[in-house]
Amino acid sequence: MPHKRPTNSIVIGLSMDEAASVETPSGKSAADENFPVGSRLLPARLRPHVAAFYAYARAIDDIADNPDLDPADKLERLEGFARAVSGADSTGPAFRKAHTIRHSLDATGVTHRHCVDLTRAFKQDATKLRYDDWDDLVGYCSYSAAPVGRYLVDLHGESDAAYPASDALCNALQVLNHLQDCGDDYRTLDRVYLPQDWMAEAGIGVEVLAGSRTPAGLRRVLDRCLDATDGLLAQAERLPGALRDIRFSMEAAAIVAIARKLGRELRRRDPLAERVVLTKVQFGACLAVGIGRALSGRARRRTRRKLLPS
């Protein structure tokens, strides 16, 4: 089905107060993410749609991560969002952000499946606290992270042939986020994303995550996760070149550079001792590097095409 041409007209709908009975805002915003959300690299006409998608994702993530809600309550709230975004409930005032993104999806011709997949992941967060191995973790990421990239691919009218590289990038970002938050996730939610088989091989239990310093065994597990994440990023390197839209290509290349740099920081710093994030200078440098790589890659491909025999 061809995508409709996006405009920046989104039906905002109901008030924030009416959503308060279901949402549990954490106070986190796009500024807290490891990657640019709706940055100026993207066309202006698309940014309101990206903002609506992010607001939906933030709302359901906050529900899943609220330590004061029991699992049954989380599941009920998340199911309400899934019903609203798919159109099964088109009026419930508590699900304003779901109605907003549904109107956006209608306007752009993008499937609601990506939003529903996110909700599936956060339902899993409500009940699943451990991950057996790397494949188990990546399986979770395929619902908690990959839909974000797929949404952007579809929003830009790109081919779904870009999905595998996009999935790899989003999954890598998700794992990096898990490593950043490994101590907080354990202490506040008893949730551990680190592969349990790797922890067992390192001779450690989850209780080490309550400490203020990373012991040697945990360091080996973190580095093993980073090695696997580097493998994902090697696949993600193909994404900028697979995109027709130059602005989207530049943003993708910048995000790859950000992920690479954050991975290096997590190798040399201790996520139990501090929140490992990039400085504004590092973040800006990654944006510049990514943009430069996207533009030079585009120029090389044009040159090769000119050299091909006609």
Image: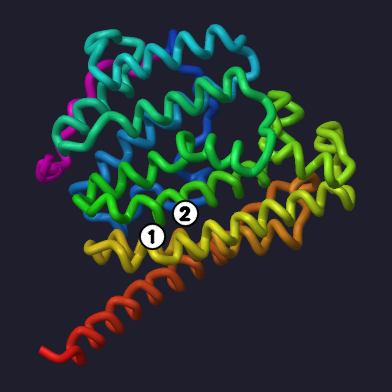
Report which quarter residue 229 is drawn in: bottom right
The quadrant the C terminus occupies is: bottom left
Count of marks overlaid on the render: 2
Disc 2 is placed on an element classified as: helix
Q: Position of residue 66 (x, y in %)?
A: 59, 20
The quadrant the N terminus occupies is: top left
* Residue type at the position of mark 1: Ala
Disc 1 is placed on an element classified as: helix
Taking the spot 35% from the left edge, 72% from the top edge, the residue there is 294
- Mark 2 vs mark 1, foreground winner is 2
What's the mark number on residue 169?
A: 2
Residue 52, placed above or below residue 285: above
Q: Using the image as rendered, state which of residue 150 and residue 96 is in the foreground.
A: 150
Residue neighbourhood size for the residue with mark 1, other residues' Cα within 10 Å, grouped as few (<14), some (14–19), many (≥20): many
Horizontal side of 7 relative to 167 (left or right) equals: left
Magenta segment main secondary structure: loop
Determine contact: label 2, label 1, CB under 8 Å: yes
Q: Which residue is mark 1?
A: 252
Taking the spot 53% from the left edge, 30% from the top edge, the residue there is 27
Taking the spot 43% from the left edge, 43% from the top edge, the residue there is 146
Residue 171, placed above or below residue 27: below
Q: Position of residue 68 (x, y in %)?
A: 63, 13
Q: Using the image as rendered, state which of residue 85 and residue 43 is in the foreground.
A: 85
Magenta span of residues: 1-19
